[in-house]
Image (cartoon, helix red, strand yellow):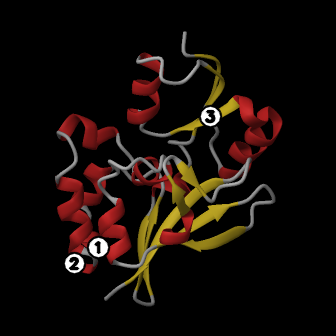
Amino acid sequence: MWFNQYFLPSDLHQALQLLEKYGTGARLIAGGTDLILALEEKKIPPVEVVVDITRIADLQKISITNDRVEIGTCVTLANLIRSETIQQSVPLLVDAARQVAGPQVRNLATLGGNVANASPAADMVPALLAYDARVRIAQRDGELRNVRLDHFLKGYRQVDLAPGEIVYSFYIDVP
């Protein structure tokens, strides 16, 4: 068994509360393509608690306002490819997403997971960097802080994410 407890919060507040309650024993999951593989291959030890954030509606939105595109962390790469907003506003993201694995993986893999794992093989990072993307991070108190993506990525598997924080979305000023 990869984990002892599984939670499926319906809103951001519940997810943040679970992270606060279980601390370092909790791992977030959305698509799970990286986490499940790491657990299967025993690259990481089993986790105590899994917090599945896929049902949080705010994390699945794609919107454009005032020439700024915002993409929720749980938007799958397949949905990114299909989005007319993304196709018209930031087409390089569509091209990058099409290069990721096959349709089965793209149907599960999320933009947030691809970036927040800080893997050198993260296919979406170069396109996001080309657009000077920003990361919106939900903090324990529910407030959002904004960080440039190039500052969010700290090194191999290291990001600017404090315990109890969740990558909320990515935003890009439309070129």
Query: Does residue 174 lie above or below 94 as drawn?
Result: below
Disc 3: which residue:
27
Q: How far apart are labels 1 and 2 at the CA level?
A: 5 Å
The residue shown at (32%, 58%) is 124
Q: Secondary structure at mark 3?
A: strand
Count how many numbered circles sit on residues in the image. Answer: 3
Give amino acid for label 3: Arg
Query: Does residue 23 lie above or below 76 as drawn?
Result: above
Going from the N terminus, do you reach mark 1 or mark 3 first? 3
Disc 2: which residue:
88
Q: Secondary structure at mark 2?
A: helix
Is there CB contact under 8 Å for labels 3 and 2?
no
Q: Secondary structure at mark 1?
A: helix
Residue 30: image location, x then y, percent: 48, 40
Q: How far apart are labels 1 and 3 at the CA level?
A: 31 Å
The residue shown at (63%, 52%) is 166
Is there CB contact under 8 Å for labels 1 and 2?
yes
Instruction: Report the quarter where the N terminus lies.
Output: top right
Left of 152 or right of it: where is 83? left
Give amino acid for label 2: Gln
Q: Quadrant of residue 143?
A: bottom right
Disc 1: which residue:
85
Q: Quadrant of residue 8?
A: top right
For the residue carrying disc 2, how many other residues have a C-alpha within 10 Å: few (<14), some (14-19), or many (20+)? Answer: few
